[in-house]
Image (cartoon, rainbow, N blue to C red):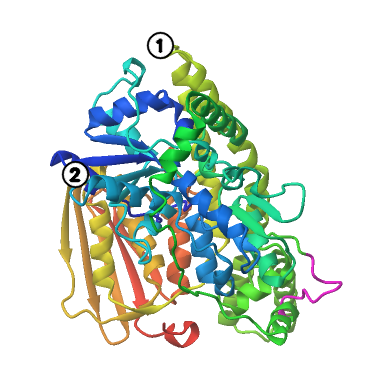
Amino acid sequence: MCPHGALTYHDGFSNVQDFLAAKTNIVAVLDPAFPVETELGTPRQVVSALKQIGFAEVWEGAFGADLISRVYFRLLHEETITPIISSFCPAIVFYIQKYYPQLIPNLAPVVSPMIAVGKVARELKGADWKVVYITSCFARMGEMVTPEVAGYIDEVITFDDIRRLVHEAGIDQATLPETEFEGPRPYRGRIIPVIGGLSSTMWESLDFLSDEISITGGNRQSISAIGQLAQGDIQGKFLDCVFCNGCVDGPFAKRNLSILASRQIVARYTKSEMDKQDFSGAMAELDRFQHIDLSRSFQSLEQKLPTPTEEEIGVVLRKIGKLPPHQNLDCRACGYSSCRDKAIAVVQGMAHEEYCLPYLLAESKRIYHELEKSHEDLKVSHQDLEQAQTQLIRAEKMASIGQLAAGVAHEINNPLSTILLYSHMFQKSLAPDDSRKEDIALVISETNRAKEIVQGLLSFAREKKLRVYEINVNDILEDVLNLIVNQSLFLNIEIKKFLAPDMQTIVADETQLKQVFLNIILNAAQAMGGNGTLTISTTFDSMQVKVKIADSGPGITPEVMANLFHPFFTTREKGTGLGLAISYGIVERHQGKIDVETELGKGTTFIITLPVTAIAETAGVK
């Protein structure tokens, strides 16, 4: 999660909308986790809803799980490289390809259930039909276009997208009839979206009481297991792991149920459907497609960071006073699990050595004593004294904010998450006309706002190291304007651009500068109340680039100006007061500055001045 909403993903929703508008024949394949989406109705009401939306056929993706379980059964009874790692979860597969390519030979050379059922659909329906997979997992979107398996699934969309389509179509799920699924019927494969589900589809092929099978789920546990496997600490025949707590816990799964409740829903659905089916008939259905090739290969996508030497790690630990065995506090206030991990991240360029809470506190004391000594000896110039005082204020501020952030992240986020969970559950239990629904909605809204404040606090306390490139400021401004121009807040704002032609490139962090410009532009729009003129201009010379963002708002009072860049200072009812503070820090780390010109009743202009090459030597051009 990003507190500024800077992360996004690409899916096939718009393409699927086009398919539906063109009345294309589409097979909708439901991920086996779909029974958990209870607000869409019963499983067969989901079929009715999808058909009303415009999908020609609706299949259960669990049939692909039954197909691959046979391949796994044969694989685990052959002499092969062990332990075998299941290739069911694309997030695990991508992780190994990128960070543990030495384990690629251990990956089961088997397609996922999604690709397996896609191959069946291609064979039965032909090239004129589209195959759309509906899932709780966005890793499936990446898997769909992987060269080794591309072409069998046309688009991947999420359960959230289906909820949106149902809402836009005005469908009342509660009144829908029940409609049977089309396509080959799955059997035991319906259990695959829970942790250990893949192993369960193989019946008695493995001895669960021995150490030949290891089952795990969740990002921390799975990443740890893969690391231990690479080190040789895990033995056995089969490692069945998934990145989430099963597909029922995917990023787009509904959060109103616990993992246990979701597992039980899937288990009950699997058992009830199996009870309705004839075993021999189910096996005969699988035999129909035994000729389909379900094998695949994997290529290395290695993206490892450099491994620091012990000497490099020791240099960092020594500088921040955390040499083991007696000085490494491992307090985790920096966000890393140990002082050693923090030092490794510093060497890899992923963290700043000075953002260590005990180190900052010690530095603030040291600077304070130096100031006292300087005053006593009267040997320091006025300018040097001001710089030292500024450094002290900065160090103490970062130390106190870092200390607060480290505490609130754990102590506040956990209870807030609990409040959200039970509020959603309570809201769902209320009748549609219950007057308490509005009160619960307010509780949820305010709790989410509290979580955003905590995330903003962490973003302010943990400044990111600059990732600099040669960039064009005009291009960044155009990108930011494209992001916001269609937002409702800007519909009645006239945007004027005076961007210098042949703009001089600068060496800077593109992502962080986008955040600065976005913060200032949003503040300007809010100051104008969504109605006025926003003027953006750029100029440059051989030494620096200037960006001016001017609004026609009411201007800023002297009282507000005095606190403008202070953290937590805000004039908005629901603001966090961190946007401009973060922006100021980003510009400062670029060795630039932000100036503000304002006149009451006439508007405000923010002037961001950035050096052309000043940080190139200190940050390194990529």
Q: Residues within 10 Å of mark 2 (few under 14, many from 20)?
A: some
Answer with left or right where residue 458 lies relative to residue 156.
right
> Which residue position holds label 2?
19
Answer with left or right where residue 273 lies relative to residue 607.
right
Classify residue 542 by image quadrant.
bottom left
Considering the whole magenta stretch, tell me its main secondary structure: loop
Q: In the rendered structure, find residue 433 and report the number of the disc placed on it.
A: 1
Query: Which span is picked out in magenta?
Result: 319-329
Residue 342 painted magenta: no
- Nearest the camera: 416 or 281? 281
Q: Residues within 10 Å of mark 1 (few under 14, many from 20)?
A: few
- Nearest the camera: 409 or 389? 409
Which quarter of the rendered picture does the C terminus lie within? Answer: bottom left
State the separation of the CA atoms marked 2 and 1.
37 Å
331 shown above or below 242:
below
Q: Dot 1: what SS?
A: loop
- Nearest the camera: 200 or 288? 288
535 shown above or below 51:
below
